[in-house]
Image (cartoon, rainbow, N blue to C red):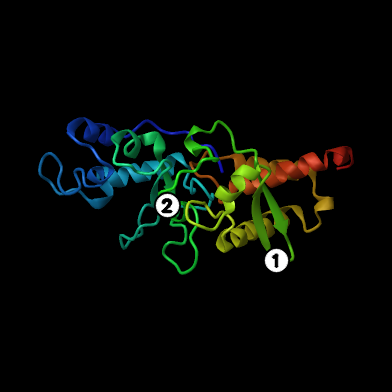
Amino acid sequence: MLPIEKLPEPQDLLDYKRESSAPTYDGFTAFRQERNDAGNRIPRNETPFYKLREQLLREQKFVCAYCGQKVLQVENQHGKAQMKTEHFLPQNDEAGNDLNYQNLLGCCLGNDNKKGKNHCDSMKGDKVLQQITNPAAMQCRDEDIIYKVNNASEEVQLDTSNDNKRKELIGDTKGCLNLNHDHLRKERFSIFKNVLKRRLGEDQTQWNFQEVQRLISDYDDSSDGHHKAFKDFVTWYLRDWLVKNQSNTSRR
């Protein structure tokens, strides 16, 4: 889970809160949705709510705030949602919470459009996460989060050194994030197999320190405005490998 550097609050959201006598989140979703001040019909992708969701993705560098998989667009060409707008603290019909821009995150669909269990916002629902910090308030990644590669089952599991956080992070019931959903475990392993192993080699005992550091630099580079998928897993795993193999530095 990566920290998010929030952009300035969108002017449209500020305008809505100023102009409305009783501002609500649902009210903002319909704000200037049909016509602008001149009476002209507004294209759907230019409405205030759509632009807010675009900004959430842009400041998160187009990855889900929780699981880190790619979320590239608000809607597809058919107008079908490709993301969710998450309230870290659940909606409670109070403008100070529901319309607090620091409380708004962009999340993936969380398997909500498919059969089976959900993850991320779709599993969390309207529950309060007591042990996990809002990514928009984090100064650095959550150092309690670790990852475990299982080659036999071809999956990468997220884990934590903090027992109090474990249920909220990986529990698969409502109110939890379920970040070890089958899809996420398999997708992380795909990155491990097709990026790390392909670039560094099958035998981790022979990995080259300079190449590992270069790969970390590649994943840390978001100068194009995008994080790579599952960046948190990749950079944590490689840095952890460097620490564990530091004594061999002089031989590589």
User: In the image, what residue occupies the spot 44% across and 55% down?
Assistant: 122
Return the residue at label 1: 153
Residue 41 percent coordinates (x, y): 15, 49
Q: Earlier in the sequence, mark 1 or mark 2?
A: 2
Looking at the rendered structure, the kind of residue marked 2 is Gly
Neighbor class of circle 2 (other Cα within 10 Å; few <14, some 14-19, many 20+) is some
Q: With 122 as the anchor, is 214 left or right in this view?
A: right
Looking at the rendered structure, the kind of residue marked 1 is Ser
Q: With 29 as the anchor, is 1 left or right in this view?
A: right
Callout in the foreground (1, 2) = 2
Return the residue at label 2: 125
201 shown above or below 143: below
Q: Quadrant of the C terminus?
A: top right
- Name the one closer to the observer, 223 or 17: 17
182 shown above or below 2: below
- Circle 1 — which element? loop
